[in-house]
Amino acid sequence: MNRKNKIAFLPGKHRLFANVSAIGFGLLTFTVQAQTLKSPRPNIVIINADDLGYGDIGAFGATDIKTPKIDSLAANGIKLISLYSSSPVSSPSRFGLLTGRYPRRAGIDHVFFPESFTGIPSSEVTIAEKLHDNGYSTGIVGKWHLGHHFQYLPLQNGFDEYYGIPYSNDMQGVAYLQGNQPDSLTVNQHYITQTYTRKAVDFIQRNKGKSFFLYLAHNMPHVPLYVSPPFEGKSGRGLYGDVIQEIDWSVGQVLQALKDNGLDKNTLVIFTSDNGPWRQFDIEGGSAGPLRYGKGTTFEGGQRVPGVAYWPGKIKAGSVYSDLALQLDIFPTLLSLAGINAADLKNPLDGEDISPVLLGKGHRKGNEFVYFNNGKIEAFRKGDWKIHFPTKEETLLGLTIFQGTDSLLINLKDDLAEQHDLRKIYPEKEKELLQALDAFQKRFGNNPPRLIQSMPADNSHIKKLLERHPEAKLPSRF
Ligand SMILES: [Ca+2]
């Protein structure tokens, strides 16, 4: 049993003691002293919305939804206008954000369901784990979605505290967990955003005397949409817009809590989304703005997400970075900003340290991104160029999610909407991208098989009953 497994089953407050036992008290004392000698480490707040589209906040072009607080983060910080989540769906995206590794490396190819018995493997190291081991208080409020059985929950993955719904709000068994235990089996979804905001503010207040990492992962605006009464009917885009305006209010509350506790100057705040808008729910599914399609696809609307970072005095106000950046970069970047050595990591990282980008000191190293969907590579970007492999038409409830497409070679600089295939005009560019992708695959190597995440019920007895009684009507629970 490795050290992680040994300490994994202790509640958060006991884990520090386990660490002391494991590495020796003298070494711990030295580590803490070394840390206090350095310049203050930033507190870190990541706010991750669920299915928020590229075109759903003012700073990224929305005019019918008012998001003054998020816009102020962008105006006084940096906007990453070419930031990608590592998957067009939730669980793998969250894995990428928290580990800095493509989710394919762990076999997390799609989302976890209430019937899933699998979750984030214990061999993975989350950013919370690294920050916790280096003296940070770590808390998550909101949607986890990396497995909800005990060993996969946040407290076993580096977080000291957890409050939230462990998966999506459209799934069976929506309940609030407090730590590893259910706190409430009834959730009034109208108040999810309010509840999360209250918990986030409380975490900030309780940890103001320490370095902390807060991961606030909203369940909204994933369908079904709910908003609390003060926000009803207030936006120019129906219920979806109302929900975003409540999230914007929530961002304002977090910023106010930082200010009230004298922490605003030494806290890095990142705002982003886990994947693009769920377009098949039309007006309740958000907007990808100028981008093609949305959630569940590897067109830009599926994975290019709003990205804002704010750290007054460190990040230059009004900065805009238009080159490639990845949520996979968050792990190495936070380690770098917190002065934590990453040399002991055994698992290869796929992200880059983009602290030079945030601090206005340089560009990101590397210009490639691999678009995985359901564990398969569907597209590849290098610089401004993207190659997208053929897709089939997909429908849901009789609605077309997207029409099938042939292979496409796109120049994203000129064609953000991915409408013009340039393969015939630039065959050498297509060849160059395919060679680069081939080199990536060689480096990436073999990875574990897909985790079993969906296990449908065996309903053969129902089928046989219907065969015996074709006139029968099924009870509604079937
Ligand atoms: Ca999502």
Image (cartoon, grey):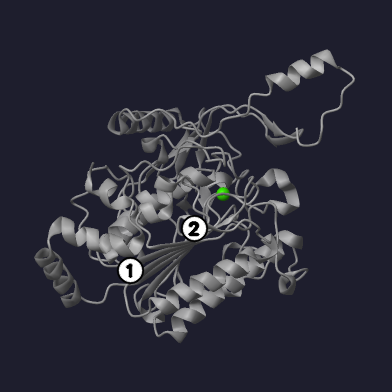
**Residue at the spot 27% in from the left edge and 42% down from the top edge:** 348
Q: Is residue 12 visible?
A: yes
Q: Is residue 363 visible?
A: no
Q: Is residue 47 above or below residue 391?
A: below
Quarter of the image containing the C terminus?
Answer: top right
Q: Amino acid at mark 2?
A: Ile
Could you say which is closer to the camera, residue 123 or residue 336?
123
**Residue at the spot 11% in from the left edge and 69% down from the top edge:** 30
Q: Amino acid at mark 1?
A: Leu
- Give the left or right position of residue 102, taking residue 190 as reference: left
Label 1, residues with CA under 10 Å away: few <14, some 14-19, many ≥20:
some
The tally of labels here is: 2
On the image, the x and y values in percent for residue 134 come to 24, 64
Task: Say which mark, if any, is on residue 271.
Answer: none
State the residue position of label 2: 81
Q: Is residue 295 above or below residue 224?
A: above
Quarter of the image containing the N terminus?
Answer: top left
- Give the left or right position of residue 32, taking residue 124 as reference: left
On the image, the x and y values in percent for residue 224 come to 70, 52
* Residue at the top extreme of this rendering: 468
Element on which disc 2 rests: loop
Q: How far apart are labels 1 and 2 at the CA level?
A: 16 Å
Q: Is residue 242 above or below residue 38?
A: above
Q: Quadrant of residue 108?
A: top left
Could you say which is closer to the camera, residue 27 or residue 475?
475
On the image, the x and y values in percent for residue 288 come to 62, 51
State the residue position of label 1: 359
Whether pointer 1 and pointer 2 mark residues with C-beta atoms closer than 8 Å, the reply is no
